[in-house]
Image (cartoon, helix red, strand yellow):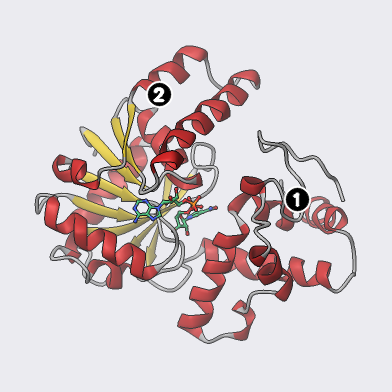
Amino acid sequence: MSFSKVAVVGAGVMGQGISQTVASTGTEVELFDIDADHLSLSIKSLSDEMDREIERWGMTSSEKKAILSRIKTTPNLTDAEDFPLIIEAIPEDLALKTSLFSKLDKVCPPETIFVTNTSTLSITEIGAATARPDKVIGLHFLNPVPKIPLVEIVRGLKTSDETYEKIKEFAATLGKTPVKVFEYPGYVTTRIIVPLLNEAMHVLMEGVATAGDIDNAIKLGYGFNIGPLALADKMGLDVVMDWMENLLNELSDHKYNPCPLLRKMVRAGHLGVKTGQGFFKYDSDGNRLTEE
Ligand code: NAD
């Protein structure tokens, strides 16, 4: 099923990628963010990312123009009131997400479907903040959204079959292969990748090898196309730490305890590609500057 127009809330790494992907199918997108400056920066960052794709021959200038012409931005949440589908991509914080959906519930018509891109939080709990838990569902895109062919469709306890079927068809219109997941902290992808990222950080912290060598070992040794430390940098170290804390909180399993090095880097504001400094250094276009 395709929707006539889609609202995306949160113009960060994921909101930008989701907006581009949805707009590339010919659908009009309204992109919201609480931070107006961030909103205009997000369009510049999307445009720069598409320019890099054009340089790699992955897209044409006219495709870029068409995509950008379909993405409008607004800091005003009430503009979402007549959208049939809302996709949320704000930070991984349950209180933030429930407060947002409870506000949206009051302004949107009862048939609007609410999608969350959460990586670890409970769809049932997010749905409970609304009067339409049957129309609340998780659609877990991975970063970079336009390139990753997978999406996890996460059902909460009250998500209806009708909502699931509509969102499954929507995922197909975006060219994504869906994996059906029943709600459980971390679903499939986040739960499996997080311990690997954390272990790589422990190996670095314990001085076993340099960041570059750890990533090369995993890439070349196991056929990954990106090393765990570069992957964490791309995801955002603050985002990875939020995932771990949510998993630790839900499951009380020590394996989800964030590595002290990760905590230290987040406290220092070294968040990875988006701040230019994580396990590696990056320029403002996101190109890696350091190998070690
Ligand atoms: P981000 O920090 O890059 O962006 C979040 C955006 O939300 C910011 O622009 C912020 O200004 C905005 N925001 C904050 N509160 C808001 C509100 N109340 N209303 C509107 N906008 C608000 O985060 P991200 O990496 O894009 O992650 C967003 C979500 O996607 C999280 O739930 C995360 O777990 C999930 N996710 C992230 C990745 C990844 O690799 N980064 C992958 C899959 C899923």
Q: Which residue lies furthest to the front in this view?
A: 37
Measured from the top left, where is residue 96 in percent x and y?
Answer: 35, 64
From the viewer's side, name the closer residue of 40 and 27: 40
The part of the image, by quadrant, that contains residue 240 is bottom right
Kind of element beneath mark 2: helix
Seen in the image, is 133 located left or right of residue 180?
left
Measured from the top left, where is residue 245 in percent x and y?
Answer: 53, 75
Whether tag 2 and tag 1 are in contact, CB under 8 A, the answer is no
Local packing at callout 1 (Cα closer than 10 Å; few below 14, some 14-19, many 20+) is few
Residue at 62%, 59% in the rendered image: 237
Kind of element beneath mark 1: loop
From the viewer's side, name the closer residue of 268 and 86: 268
> What numbered label is drawn on residue 285?
none
Residue picked out by circle 2 = 67
> What numbered label is drawn on residue 223?
1
Disc tally is: 2
Q: Is residue 215 visible from the viewing direction of this image?
A: yes
Seen in the image, is 4 located left or right of residue 155?
left
